[in-house]
Structure formats: C-alpha cells, structure tokens
Image (spheres, grey):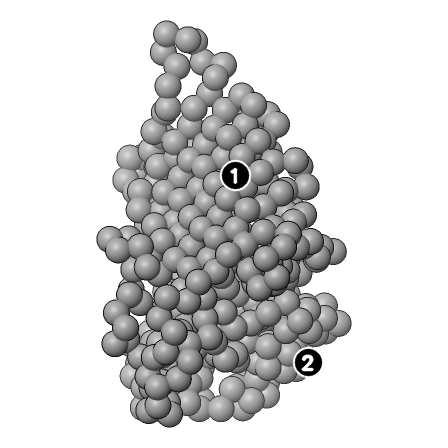
Amino acid sequence: MASRNLNVGLVGYGFMGRTHSNAFRQANRFFDLEYQPVLKAVCARDGEKAKTFAAQWGYGSVETDWRKLVARPDIDLIDIASPNDTHAGIASAAAAAGKMVLCEKPLGRNAAEAERMVETVEKAGVANMVWYNYRRVPAVTLAKQLIDEGRLGRIFHYRAKFLQDWTISKDLPQGGAGLWRLDVNVAGSGVTGDLLAHCIDTALWLNGPIDQVTAMTETFIKERKHNLTGKVEKVGIDDASAFLARFANGSLATFEATRYARGHKALYTFEINGEHASISWDLHDLHRLQYFDHRDEGRLRGWRSVHITDGDHPYMKHWWVPGLQIGYEHTFIHHIADFLEGLSSGRPSAPTFRDALATDYVTDAVLRSAASGRWEIVKRAS
Ligand code: SOE
C-alpha cells in the first residue's frame, strides 16, 4: 500500500498528456509502490480545454500559465508533455523550484538545449527521467536481459527503422495544435528527433555508445501553409533520415526513419545480430520477441517467436494470467512505476536527463553529417 503522496502537475494535454495521465492513474493498481501519484493540476494555455481534460482524467485544478504551476507549493513533480520548444524553459524553472521533473522525448530540440536541462536538474539535485517508453515494452526489456547475460556474444550488427506515412499529403499544413511536429522552430527537427530518437535511445541502452555516424536527410515537401501565420512557408524539418553508425563495441549499424512510407503507421523494428544469436522485435507485434540461437540442436535450429506474456517475463507478473498480452499504454505505466520505485530505493530510474542527452548528441551528429556529407564524431554524455 502506498504511504506517500506525490503531487503531480502536468503541462500539456495532447496525446502524450493522455499516455502519462493514464500511467499516473494505473501504476499503483498494478505495482506495489511506496509513492502514489496524486493528479493535482493540469496546465495548458487553453483554459476550457484544460478544464475538460482535468474532468476527464481527474486532475484537481487547472492552470493556464506553467510558471504559476511551477511556483505552486503543493506540487512535487512537474511532468512535461507539451511541444518540444517548451521543454527546456519548464524543466529548468521546475528544477530551480526544487520539483522533480519528467519530460517527454526528445529532451531538447538540440543537444545544447538538452545540456542546459541536464545542468539544471543535476545542480538542483532533483529526480528526473525522460519518457523513452519503448525501453519498457516487456519484449524489449527481455532483449536487454539476454544481451547483458552475454547470450548473443559479440555483437556485429544493429539495424533499426521507424516508418510512418502521415505527412505525405502536400496539403497538410505545418504548425499549431497537432501539427507542431512539422514546424522546425517548435520541434527542433523532423523524424530525426521524433522517431530516430526512439531507435537511438533503445540502441544505446541495448548496445552501448555510438562513436560516429554518416547520414542523409530529405525534405520531400519544401513548402507548406503555416497554421499560425496562414502563409505558405518553407518547411525546415527532415521528412526522412537515414544513417550508418559505428558503435564503440565495434558493431556496425543502420538506422532509418520516415513519414513517407505509405502503408506504415508506426513500424518501429530492430534486429541485432551477434556471434551466437540474433534478436528481432517489431512494434506492430510488440508482445513477441524473435530469437535465433546457433547453439540450438541443429535439427531443430530456427527462429523462435517467443510470446512475452508469462509471469517470468519482465513486468508481466504484474498483469493478467500467462498468455494474455498487454500493449502500448502499459509501457508508460512501467516507466512511472520504475520511477516511483527509484524514488524509494534511491536508485535513479533510467533514462535520466543525462542518459537522454546521449540521444540528443547522436541526433545532432546525424543532422550535422547530413549537412556536411561527412562522418561525424558523436559527443559522449558523461
Ligand atoms: C509521432 O507520430 C509519434 O507520435 C511520436 O512523437 C511518438 O514519440 C512515437 O512513439 C509515435 O509517433
């Protein structure tokens, strides 16, 4: 039974505001935690929409200025689920006010912004975490365990992609609610910071640091109407981005993300090939892990499709009975449950802001390489 309340102030009520709110509400129902999130306030510029959101999710009050939310003495934790251009200002003010800070990915619009965010949370000594939720898909967590146990042996290849198709129409405007991901000033970049950031976070976690990259990006639709100005404006984001990488452990990698892969909505996949075994995973079939082990008896050797729903699979003992699968929203519940557990144990839950800075260093190097046409060295976060 939880014995300590943790008062949450959420900024933003979009898609991510909903995933986070659901996680705050569900975590204590399925995990035995000392801390219990209390939904104190939601903040958004549009007061009416914020009120509707508060009523739907059970937030006790509404603010329309995040500065007021951050200044409230009854808030312990600020959760940032607003567009990327707001992350740095809110996180820094929240940390300076002594609040714990959770932030939606990517941490900053670029590494310089992310560095300042790391500095402020570390100086303030406040707990912090970034919502790279795919780490906490049970099948992905199992992949991490298998790699750490050395089952794959030396890793040779890492291959990841994240494909979508929702921006192909040239009539789709950029900017404003729902479409800020197309506005470079708000988002920082296109698919590099939005989709590749997920692939990179998982890759760094599973396979260690990336040393260097060589990349190409493309903006297929060069101009779009801007929703806020009403004018046709240059598009500054990358619509597609692909890069080759060398990991510090000597393995080679390919990464690709696009919003122009007709037929794909959120196809995040990765495959890792090691000396003894290979692993592959697919977000569209997220409760399965494909595993091939060369050490299996030859006559029966082949790819196994493991259904990750048993009590001894990561996180699964907290859910239903063996064989019954869970989904996307549970990854956020695992994320907050681990964060709350970390508060009790004193062991910070990853990815911290510093861990997420490492991803921003890779995405910065990718964009630098796409512009320079050269291999670029990736800065290390610690
Ligand atoms: C983009 O469409 C998006 O919503 C990302 O911003 C999320 O991080 C990703 O998980 C799903 O796709």
- Hey, what amino acid is under mark 2? Ala
Q: Residue 273 in the image: state x and y as whole percent.
A: 51, 30
Q: Where is residue 9? Give x, y as percent.
A: 49, 78
Looking at the image, residue 155 lies above or below residue 263:
above
Horizontal relation, residue 115 to residue 287: left or right: right
Of the pair 276 and 372, the residue shown nearer to us: 372
Marks 2/1: CA distance? 39 Å
Q: Quadrant of residue 312?
A: top left
Q: Which residue is mark 1?
A: 158
Residue 126 appears anywhere in the view:
no
* Cβ at disc 1 under 8 Å from ligand 1: no
- Mark 2, residue position: 96
Q: Nearer the viewer, residue 274 or 1?
A: 274
- Mark 1 surroundings within 10 Å by alpha-carbon count, few (fewer than 14), some (14 through 19), many (20 or more): many
Point 46% across, 20% down: residue: 293
Relative vertical location of residue 273 with respect to residue 78 in this rendering, above or below: above
Q: Residue, x 59% and y 77% (percent of image)?
A: 88
Above or below residue 152? Residue 136 is: below
Three-letter code, disc 1: Tyr
Q: Nearer the viewer, residue 305 or 28?
A: 305
Indicate the quadrant where residue 323 lies. Answer: top left
How packed mark 2 is, by other alpha carbons closer than 10 Å (few <14, some 14-19, many 20 or more), is some
